[in-house]
Amino acid sequence: MRDVAVVGIGVMRFGELWETPLRDLCVNASLQAVEDAGVDRVDSIVVGSMACGLFTEQEHVAALAADYLGLGPVPATRVEAACASGGAALRAGFAEVASGLSDVVLVLGVEKMTDVSGDATTAGLATAAEQEYETFYGATFPGMSAMIARAYMERYHAAPEHLAAVAVKNHAHGALNPLAQFQNTITVDDVLQSVLVADPLHMLDCSPVSDGAAAVVLCSAETARRARKRPIRITGVGFATDTISLYRRPDLTRMAAVERAAKAAYAMARRAPGDIQVAEVHDGFTIMEICSIEELGFVPRGQGKDAAPSGLTALGGRIPVNPGGGLKARGHPVGATGVAQACEIVTQLRGEAGKRQVPGARIGLTQNMGGSAGSASVHIFEA
Amino acid sequence: MITARVWREKKPRYLNQIGRCKGCGRLFFPPRRVCDGCRGREIETRAMSETGRVLTYTIIRVAPPAFAQEVPYAVAVLEMDDGARMLTQVTDVAPEDIRTGMRVRLEFRKIRQHGRTGVIAYGHKAVPE
């Protein structure tokens, strides 16, 4: 396999972007990434999007992006893995460059979620679960994470305050990120006093509904020498699946796909969890960050709950997690998230993260998951 | 939504039909062609135990349109006495009185109506044993 580097990033501020059509989300992030890279050509486009058809009635989004970017006739295809669609697209783009099939690949993550009612968004997100045997009975997407949260809290004696601390930390980080959807700080009381969505999860345990896009330009190490900025290598790639149905998991507190994806990425990069200096982790719900940092090997099992309250995963802690604000504060246009995480880590490893910079960070990790960890993606980046 | 989507799932949902791998004994709800434990393809079907216990649960307070009239309602992961697992609603009990480990029995109930067509779908809900 050839070495692969990120040479350009493009990420916009996520939010309720009513004035911006889907095609402009695609174009704005992509142009920014191509200009950041300084490349004069793109050989292929890979788009990650979970449900653009359900949310905007527009499928065929990869061809739409290629067309409006003026990049036709380059090949352009879409990859889908629910909320891990962005991570899956990054992996597909990596494979194209590593194999030699393409030399310069634009990886775009995009989702436009606010064109439909809140009901329709909720129903669309629930399609990540088993439709005929989970959603059928009235389970919702937050409800699935709520059941994981209850199992975890009862096993490890965690309190709602432990979950809330994750949202508090990620809002504090988001307040330092000019591209975060929410740049306000919140308190544990704010989280616990927000409405219950699915016990024990409150509204502020949940990432928001967002519109947005993010893009990266990947190329071979040789081509990367001509890039405008220091190339950031992708040294580890891992992806794994688990039962799509939560109810069939032997241990309801585990996210085994995250562990398997992480093991594959660590092995490929010849790195260990202790080598990671900064991480972007999938906090679609607060419990997801707690379980994920255990599966990633940052903390022992059962101790994920203590990481945010103790400051371990805050900026200035041993392993800062979600310096960009995470899904909670940066926003979560589902297909864009895996690519936005990569943009944040590249920004950190370039030393361009401003007030949220992790000093001297050289090795970073992104972890993106689909559904209730039915899919998981992990990438390792090195300066 | 066409009625076929409902009637083709009748056997698992109405009869609580599960699959059992003849190779390794793993149970599946609904039945499936390939065992995800040993990849065996000899799967026999049988009825799921009608009693079991709550492994974890939540109280849904924000629901999709098909269930919006029912909030708050409880959804749980159940482990039946034969070891099979399913997810369904727990009813005939105040949601706040549900506990992990609670014994339940399955009852045949209306589950939902589908979209504009109004097709009624039945299945099993859990009630306190």
Image (cartoon, rainbow, N blue to C red):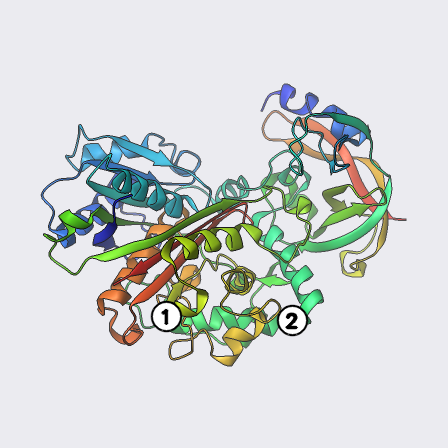
The percent position of residue A299, horizontal first and vertical second, equals 53, 70
Sequence order check, earlier mark of 2 and 1:
2
CA separation, marks 2 and 1? 26 Å
Q: Is residue A207 left or right of residue B102?
A: left
Specify the amino acid type for callout 1: Gln
Q: Secondary structure at mark 2?
A: loop
B92 over A101 or under it: above or below: below
The residue that disc 2 covers is: A158
Q: Is residue A158 left or right of residue A369?
A: right
Please give the name of the residue rendered at 68% of the width and 44% of the height, measured from the top-left corner.
Answer: A248
Number of the front mark, 2 or 1: 1
Total numbered labels: 2
Q: Secondary structure at mark 1?
A: loop
Specify the amino acid type for callout 2: Ala
The residue that disc 1 covers is: A277
The percent position of residue A85, horizontal first and vertical second, equals 41, 43
Please give the name of the residue rendered at 45% of the width and 46% of the height, measured from the top-left corner.
Answer: A239
User: Would you identify the image quadrant in which residue B5 lies?
Assistant: top right
Of the 4 image quadrants, the one containing the N terminus of chain A is top left
Chain of residue at mark 1: A
Please give the name of the residue rendered at 22% of the width and 48% of the height, measured from the top-left corner.
Answer: A217
Residue A110 visible to the viewer:
no
Please give the name of the residue rendered at 47% of the width and 73% of the height, measured from the top-left corner.
Answer: A168
In the rendered structure, find residue A46 and report the number of the disc placed on it. Answer: none
B10 over B52 or under it: above or below: above
